[in-house]
Image (tube, coloured by chain):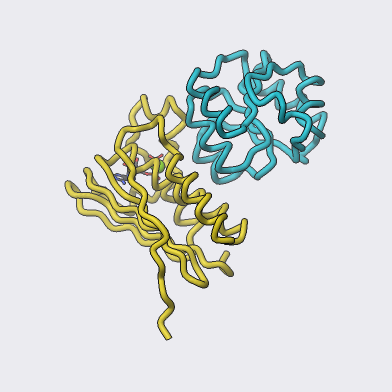
Amino acid sequence: MPSEKFLEGIYYVQGRDFVDAGVVSSDIKRALKEKGIPESVIRRVAVITFEAEVNIISYADQGTIQLFVEPGAVTVEAVDIGQGIPDIELALQEGYSTADDSIREMGFGAGMGLANIRKYSDVFTLTSEPGNGTHLTSVVKLDGK
Amino acid sequence: MTLETLVEQLDLKCKCCWEKLKAIEVNGGYAGDLLSDVMANSQAGNIWVTRQVHVNIVAVASLKEHAAIVIVQGANPEKETIERATREGIPILVSDLPEFQLVGRIYQLIGNG
Ligand SMILES: Nc1ncnc2c1ncn2[C@@H]1O[C@H](COP(=O)(O)OP(=O)(O)O)[C@@H](O)[C@H]1O
Ligand SMILES: [Mg+2]
């Protein structure tokens, strides 16, 4: 029997809006708490959504983060319109970053975001069309890592 | 150890959420200025030592459920940072010490938690 994936929420993220970085991740965290999702899962999803949110803010024009909850898993889908990622393998390498000085001054741009999303996910996919945008999917299983 | 005791012992300036210091237990600490590093490696209940002052530190501390943020070297948190921290209930503390010394003193008091 196919498991049903319920859309729990769609959250809008505006590019370059660093002041609000983390607001969407906090909303998602609150939604998962209200659903009674286990703390350990919420902690992992918080890292994933924060990094995805900051990447949209840092490198894209705008995007959305969609949250799906199904009986055994939480799925996060971050979709944006923007410059995209020309070399996914390179972008996933820890330490690789194209962040400029203004981004680094705020403590972002360590080049660990995508690597950490992958590390905290049970299923991870990242695709991008340079010039158009980026699509990241991360699944955290309730009985996962 | 409670935050209140830590604040007294280390002579920290409290910028917001005074009323919470008594009730918050500190269970260890984490030091770092790279937000991705702190997101990935710090634990809930940690006191977070940093020299970042931008409003984004509040989002990180709140998502990670840190006990408090301590800003080192007497740096002044931005107005936005204090406002957001007040809303989120994250105490912002300031120490005049450089990061290395402050972390050493916290470690002497609470070990690793
Ligand atoms: N949504 C995105 N759109 C365009 N480029 C991105 C996006 N996410 C990540 N990147 C690229 O991948 C690099 C690595 O990302 P990440 O691992 O999160 O580290 P950081 O954000 O600290 O640079 C970024 O510097 C950027 O060049
Ligand atoms: Mg990033």
Q: Is residue A2 left or right of residue A128?
A: right
Residue B56 locus on image (x, y percent): 48, 31
Q: Quadrant of residue B11?
A: top right
Task: Identify the image quadrant of the N terminus of chain A.
Answer: bottom left
**Residue with the most extreme left position:** A131
Q: How many marks?
A: 0
A50 horizontally vs A37: left or right = left
Instruction: Name the residue at 36% across, 61% down.
Output: A125
Report the quarter where the C terminus of chain A lies: bottom right
- Horizontal side of A80 relative to A2 (left or right) equals left
Q: Please determine whether, in this image, residue A26 is positioned above or below residue A102.
A: below
Q: Position of residue A23 (x, y in %)?
A: 44, 40
B73 vs A29, left or right, is: right
Instruction: Tell me if residue B109 comes above or below residue A112 in the rendering.
Output: above
Residue sitting at x 42%, y 44%: A24
The image quadrant in which ligand 1 is located: top left
Identify the residue shown where x is 54% and y is 19%: B77
Q: Where B59 sits versus B7, above or below?
A: below
Towards the viewer: A27 or A21: A27
Shown colour of chain B: cyan
Say which chain is yellow: A
Residue A55: x and y in percent read 36, 42
Q: Position of residue A143 (x, y in %)?
A: 58, 69
